[in-house]
Amino acid sequence: MSVLIDLAEITKDYGHFRALDRITLQIHSGITGLLGPNGAGKTTLIKVLLGLVKTTSGRGRLLDFELGRQSREIRAHVGYMPEDDCYLHGMTGVECVQFVAQLSRFPAIEALRRAHEILDFCGLAQERYRLVETYSTGMRQKLRFAQAIVHDPPVLILDEPTSGLDPEERQVMLNRIRLLSRDQGKAVVLCTHILPDVQSISDSVVILAHGRVLVSETLAELSRPATPSLQIRLLGLPDAFLERLRQQEIEFLPQSNGTVVLQGAPDELAKVAWKAAKETGAGIRSMTPSRNSLEEIFVNAVRSEHQNG
Amino acid sequence: MADHSIFKEAPTVAMASPDGESDQSVHHLGYRGWSGERTPLWTRWIVISKVGIRRSWENRWLKRLLFFAWLPAVWFGLGFFLWEQAANYPEWRQIVTPMIQNLPPDPVLDEIKEAVQSGTLAKARHTVWSWLLNAFIRYPQPVLMVLVIGLISPPLISQDIRSRAFLLYFSRPLTRGEYLLGKMATLWAYLALITTVPALTQYAIGVVLSPNLGVIAATWDIPFRILAASVVLMLPTSALALCFSSLTQESRNAAFAWFAIWILGWFTYGAVSTAEAFNTQQEFQRHARDHRFRQRGAVEDLPVRQESVWTHLSLYHTLGRVQSWIFGFSKMKDVLASIAILVVITCVSLVVLFYRVSAPMRV
């Protein structure tokens, strides 16, 4: 994966308050979840990336452009969806999207055509002709997403894209993001508090706290437990199955609801488990390698930061 | 209301749904990349001003005001017509002469009166045209300008603050300068419509009615003076109006501040200048009663009444002084203070504007 954002020792102070503390970070293409508790510095980091605030020290690049010096070029190549409820007063949805497309240097007619196309994609049908002041929270969320992608940017920075959406719409929004990344090759920085969203679509995760980077790793790597294991859910009484495992000298931990966790390499254990099930007549309902949940990773990272800090 | 989300019911041609659904509405294209030709970099402020102009145009009071704003132009256009008729056809002088002679004493008007008396109207053409245009831009149009800007400018920035639209603007490749230029251009467009365009139209009427196109050579500077006077009217006023708009989230507060500064300035100047005139009159009467004064009969000894320095209390009169200089009816040394005031107002307003526009980004 190519490096999308490359930051070195970025520091941002607001008076005596240090919002970003010597951030050194590389974000690659794909979908990157940017996580952190409130006040961690996520929004400040986004503003630094967009050149909306100047850094106190440090340097960095986004695509081929230098932070701070080529802010306009960066903003031309980035689609930003702000968290705040911001809109253009007195305009209809389609006018809003056309307007921001024109600000990104689309010709007027082409901007209008593109606005309709993108609003279709974002699920704003007839609502596009309503004034944005009359939109519901979810509609405004979709409108902001449409404004972020209308100019076909290679990089998307989405700040809380699923907040204010109902569960069904949330899934649809995540699908849109996933498809933009997968089929259109767009790099996405997904800034959110909703950990399952990040877990479901992200390739890598960055966790910030107190303006410092605590974790920056691929999700696959983070999810891998310290001790590899295989989690099996069984149908019916597993006693014979467990006895067979004992005979094979496999370490396991029986858990509630007919679940048993086998300690060892998942690939090897899976073969043994299938064989044991066949021999003992036990039914296997599911078999998954054990993984660390993102919630665990997040809580551990933030807790260790508190203890150290 | 039907939801045409591709993920619920209609996957796209350009981008397949992960669910593998195949039915989709004909118009639905899904997400497609775009690689067309972009407009030049410098045109983005035009986009902002176009939207501002279009949205302001929806105000029906503005349309009515614009209609009335052209009525003075018709009146002054009549002046051009009469002068040119009198210059070309002697029989028209019977109509023009009494009108000119009844005008109050004034160095410029005296020159015009002399030209009428001596029948050399063509020689005074430049002076007359300049005088008419100066009067047009100096007296009725600034009043209309106050009303037009008062209708348009208050929501221009305050609404963007209230709806937090700055994030939408400045996450695009747009600078603060371009944003402000776009907002100012909205005001300039309407101000040009009530000052520059009618003034240039009057000039064109004058040229068309004159005996030959040779008058263009004699009056070539007047269009430039019109443009300069328009700039003097537009720059400080639009900067000040937008400054008020940027200081509040409520449009009505900005409108109140805008009208208040003109009305207060006008009335304060009116009160002070009335008191000054009263004092001058008292002084004159005292001199008149003075025996020695009557013996000498030296009325000329009385100080000539200059335009009061108190005009600077009123932005309306300050603008008028500078415009008068642009049309050649004042000396530069007499308007230096007025120019300085307008420059200070413009600069301070712009500094406040730049600060306020960037303020939401700094948090």
Image: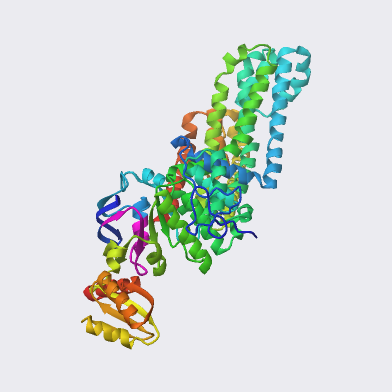
Residue B87 found in image quarter: top right
Above/below status of A273 relative to B50? below
x and y percentages locating residue B47 in the rendered image: 53, 41
x and y percentages locating residue A252 in the rendered image: 26, 82
Residue sticking out furthest to the front: A279
Residue sitting at x 33%, y 83%: A280
Residue sitting at x 44%, y 63%: A160
Residue A40 lies in the magenta-colored region: yes
Residue B281 left/right relative to A45: right
Q: Report the span colored magenta.
A: A25-46
Above/below status of A201 relative to B140? below
Closer to the camera in the image, B304 or B147 = B147
Closer to the camera in the image, A6 or A286 = A286
Residue A273 left/right relative to A182: left
x and y percentages locating residue A170 in the rendered image: 49, 65
Residue A154 left/right relative to B197: left
Residue B307 lies in the magenta-colored region: no
Residue sitting at x 35%, y 62%: A34
Closer to the camera in the image, A79 or B315 = A79
Classify the position of the C terminus of chain A by image quarter. Answer: bottom left
Residue sitting at x 60%, y 24%: B130
User: Is residue B363 visible in this depiction of the protein?
Assistant: no
